[in-house]
Image (cartoon, rainbow, N blue to C red):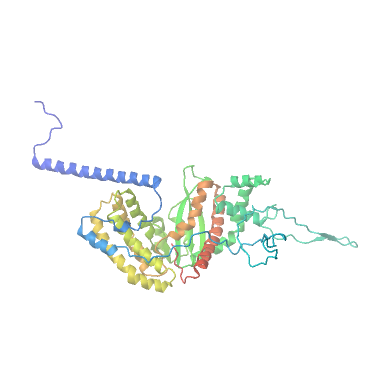
Amino acid sequence: MKKTNNQLPTDVKILQDLLLEAQSLLEKKDAEINALLEQLKLLRSQKFAPSSEKQSPEQGELFDEAEQIVEMELAALEPEKSPKIGKKKAGRKPLPAHLPRVEVIHDLTDEEKICPHDGQTLHKIGEEVSEQLEIIPAKVQVIRHIRFKYACRCCEQGIHSADMPKQAFPKSNATAATFAYIAVSKYQDAQPLYRLENIFKRSKIHIPRNTMANWMIKLGGDIFTPLINLFRDRLLEQPLIHYDETTYQVLNEAGKTAQSKSYMWVGLAGEQGKRVVLFDYAPTRAGNVPTSLLDDFSGYLVTDDYGGYNAVCEKNGITRIACWAHARRKFNDVLKIQKVKTGKAQIAMNYIGKLYQIEKACVDLSNQSRLTIRQKESNVIINEMRTWLDKSLLQSPKQSKLGNALHYLNNNWSRLVEFLTDGIIPLDNNAAENAIRPFVIGRKNWLHSSSVKGAHASAAIYSIIETVLCRMRHKAVYTERKTMPNTCCPIS
C-alpha cells in the first residue's frame, strides 16, 4: 500500500499533543462562534425589541443556577417590597395657572330668566366654570422705528435725531426676537433651516436658509463669545464636572473626507439650579482635546470608559469617576440575548439596582448626609458585589457578552466605587448624556454643519439654550415637589 502524506503518526505522545491542540482550536472556534451569535442576537434586540432598560418587578426573582452560592446571593439580593403608592387620580390636569384667562359669559336671555311655572324672576345662585386651551399661531409683525428729525431754522447747522436702540446686527432687518425664534427652532426643536424657510413662506415671508445660517454663525461666533467665556470660567471652577462626546459631521473641513468624523464635546457642572452646560466642537477625539478643555481643572471628572481623558487626569491630578449606568447597560445587553432571564447578569442588575434605590432615597439630602448613608448602606452592597465579581470572573469566558460585562466592571471598579468617598460624586454620567441628547436628536434632522464656523457657532448656541433649559427644568421639578435640595449631586 502506498503511504499518504497525511498519515497519522504512531507515537502516542505526538498523538496526544495533536489531540490537545485540536481540542484547543475547537474551543477557541466555539467561543468565537458563540460571541458572534451573541452579537447577532444583541443587534436584533436593539433593532426590533423595546429599547427601555426597565426590569419587570418579578425579574429579580427568576434565578435557577445550579451553584449553591447563587441561592445565597439571591437571598441577599431579593428586592425589597416598596410601600404601595396610591394611584394618581384619573382625569385631565387643570390648565396652567400662569396662562392668561379670557372670560366668555354665557347667560340666559331676559325671557329665559322667568320661571315657566309661576312667572317669578329667577335668582342667580352660582356659576359653572369650564376651561379650554386655545393656541394662537405665532404672531408675526413688523417693527417700524420712526426717528423724528430736528433742525434749527436760524443757523441751519446740522440735523438732530434720536439714536437707534442697540441692535444685535445693526444692518439686519430682523429683531433679536427673530434670531431667538430661529435659534430655538433649530437647536432645541431640531427644525432644519429649510423647514423654517418653508414655514415662513406660509406667511408670505421670504427668509432664505443661507441668510438664517449666516445669522446663526454671527450669533454663536460673535454675540455669544463673552458669555461662553464666562461659562467656561464657571465650569472649570466647580469641584466636579461631567463630560461626554458624540460624533459630528462637518462638510467643508480641511483634511476631512465625507466619511470622516468630528466630535461635539459637552461639559456640565454646578449645583442644581445653577448649572452650566458647555458644548465645544473639535475635529478629533484625541486625548489633546480634553487636555485643552480641562487645562485649568483639578477636581472630580465623571465620564465613560474612554481612555482619551487619562492624559489630562494624570497631568492635573484629576480624580476620574466611572459611570454605573454604563456598567449596568452591559449587563442589560446580556439579558437581551438570553432566552431565560436568569443568572449572573440579573444578579449584577439587582446589585446595581439596590445602589440606585439608596441614591433615590437620599437625593434631597446634603452631601455629608448622603455620604453617611452611602458608607453605611451602599458600602455593604459594594463589598458583597466585589466578592461575587471575583468568583464570577473565573466562571465566565472573557469573549462572551457576560465575560465582557464582568471585565468592564472589574477594570473600572476603583473608579466606580469612588462615590463612597464623597457625597458630591454622582452614581453615573447621565447628566452629561441628557445634556447632549438634544444635539443627537437634532443631528438626525439637520444631519451636518456646512463649515467649521457653523460648528463652533452651533456649540455656542447649544450651550446657551441647554444651560437655560437645565435651570428651568430644575425649577419646574422642585416647584412641583415643593422642596429644594441641598445638594449639587445630579438627579439621574
Residue 411 appears in the figure? no
The image position of residue 427, as x and y in percent, is 39, 63
Residue 122 as seen in the image, left or right of residue 19: right
Nearest the eye: 349 or 3: 349
- Residue drawn where x is 22% and y is 60% of the image: 69
**x, y percent for residue 279:** 51, 57
Q: Quadrant of residue 301?
A: bottom left
Q: Residue furthest top?
A: 1
Which residue is outermost to the right?
A: 154
Residue placed at 12% from the left, 35% from the top? 8
Q: Residue at x 70, y 53 (%)?
A: 141
Question: In the figure, residue 306 lies in which quadrant?
Answer: bottom left
Position of residue 419 measured from the top left corner of the image (x, y, whole percent): 37, 66
Q: Residue 188, percent across and down?
A: 55, 54
Q: Residue 449, relative to residue 353: is it above or below? A: above
Task: Say which quarter of the image contains residue 208.
Answer: top right
Query: From the image, which quarter does the C terminus lie in?
Result: bottom left
Above or below 95: residue 482: below
